[in-house]
Structures are given as C-alpha cells and as structure tokens.
Image (tube, rainbow, N blue to C red):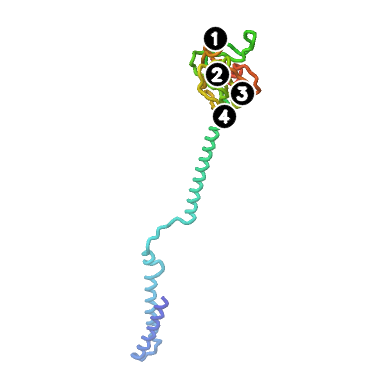
Amino acid sequence: MRAVVVLLSVAAGAGSAALQLLTGLPPTQHEPRINLLAADLDSDVSTTTGTGGPTASSGPLLIPTPSRSARDEARQLEMAEQVRKDRIAREEAERQRRAREAAEEKARHRVVAPVQGTITSNYGPRWGTTHYGLDIANVIGTPIVAPMRGVVLDAGPASGFGLWVRIQHEDGTITVYGHINSYAVSVGQEVEAGEVIAEVGNKGYSTGPHLHFEVWDPAGLKVDPLAWLQERGANVG
C-alpha cells in the first residue's frame, strides 16, 4: 500500500507542476485535491485487499494427519498387546508342561493289581512251610499286567514255576510272576503300569490255573503281596 501511495504522491507532484504551468497558480492550491485522490485510492485498496479477504479461502484444502506423538502412541499400544499375548502363550506353555509332569509322576507311582480273579492262597505259613506269594486263580490265558513301571529282569523258564517273569521297579522293589502260560516281554524291556506282560497258566508245580505273585522289597525281603497292593490302592478280586 505504501508503494501505491508513493507512486500517487510522485504522480501528484508531477501533475501539480504541470497544472502550475497551465494555470499559473501556486502549487499549494492544487495539493489538497491531489492528496484527496490519493487518500480515496488508498481507502479503496485497503477495503478490497485487506487481511482475510477473498483470496484467503481460495487455497488448497489441507487434510489433517496424525501427529508423530499419535503414531508413537499407537505403536506403543501394539507393542504392549504383543507383549500381553506372548505372556499368555508362555503361561499356557508352562501350565501344559506342569500338567504333563504331574501326569508322568502319577503314572510313575501308579499301582494296579497284576490280575483279577479269586485269591486261593495268601502269604504266610502253609503246610509246615512259608508261602511267600499270593495265589490268584483265573482261567488259562487271562492277561497279567505289570503293577507299576519297571524293567524286566527275567522272562523264561524257572525251577518250580515252569515259566516266570521278574520285574524291578523304580523304587528297587522286585515283583515275581510264576506258573504263567506264556510271556510277552523280554529281558531289559521297560514296562508301564497296566502293560500286559504274561498270561495266567498252570505250569510247574501247580494244582490249577493261577498266578503266583511275589513282592521283594528293595532290601530283598519277601513281603505280603496283598498288603503291598492294598497300601497302594490296588485291589484284587
């Protein structure tokens, strides 16, 4: 605006000089008219091109975008969610691991009866001697199972028993299965509680089909098999 006024002032000065030559009047008598014209022009320009005029809204439309802090916050939320998911996955994996270990521990100490049937002779004195086993009668071919986890020590012929199987268990206990009809394991084989190891038979010095079952404690002493089973929650018959 000042440039326009200056130009007008210059023009006014030139016009004043020309007017003076034509009229012969002093320049001061024409200056008010020239100044008035300049003032009017300045007023018009100020009115039409002032701050906030029409050109202010004619530019391109700007679409606001997320600030850097908003993007960072979103990223942090994603990372926090991923951390939460990873923690849940680890906790679930740990829960499953503990469940497996508990199941394995339970299976390790699980005890079952070696066979079901009728008890025909208990542990203790018999005919002037000691009967160190538990006789359980059943038909020939009835499955005999390992009472708990162990390793097969013997499987084959045995004096007096015809055929037998011996298993040593993890706590050092040894169990014996005599008069069997056949066996399904071999020496050194690992067996689990409830796994079939033999069949009821009538071999050796036997008066009828039955299983002669003995239990030797870790010290080698022959203990009452029925009491040993019952103490561990296994029942016969």
User: Label 4: which residue?
Assistant: 105
Q: Which residue is drawn at 61% across and 23% down?
A: 173
Q: Are marks 4 and 1 in contact (CB under 8 Å)?
A: no
Q: Earlier in the sequence, mark 2 or mark 1?
A: 2
User: Label 2: which residue?
Assistant: 157
Q: Earlier in the sequence, mark 4 or mark 3?
A: 4
Pick the front one: 234 or 7: 234
User: Label 1: which residue?
Assistant: 207
Q: What residue type is labelled 2?
A: Pro
User: Label 3: which residue?
Assistant: 173
Pair 4/3: label in front: 3
Pick the front one: 18 or 72: 72
Q: How far apart are marks 1 and 3 (CA)?
A: 28 Å
Where disc 3 sits, the SS reads loop
Q: How far apart are marks 4 and 1 (CA)?
A: 40 Å
Where disc 2 sits, the SS reads strand
Q: What residue type is labelled 1?
A: Thr
Which quadrant: the N terminus?
bottom left
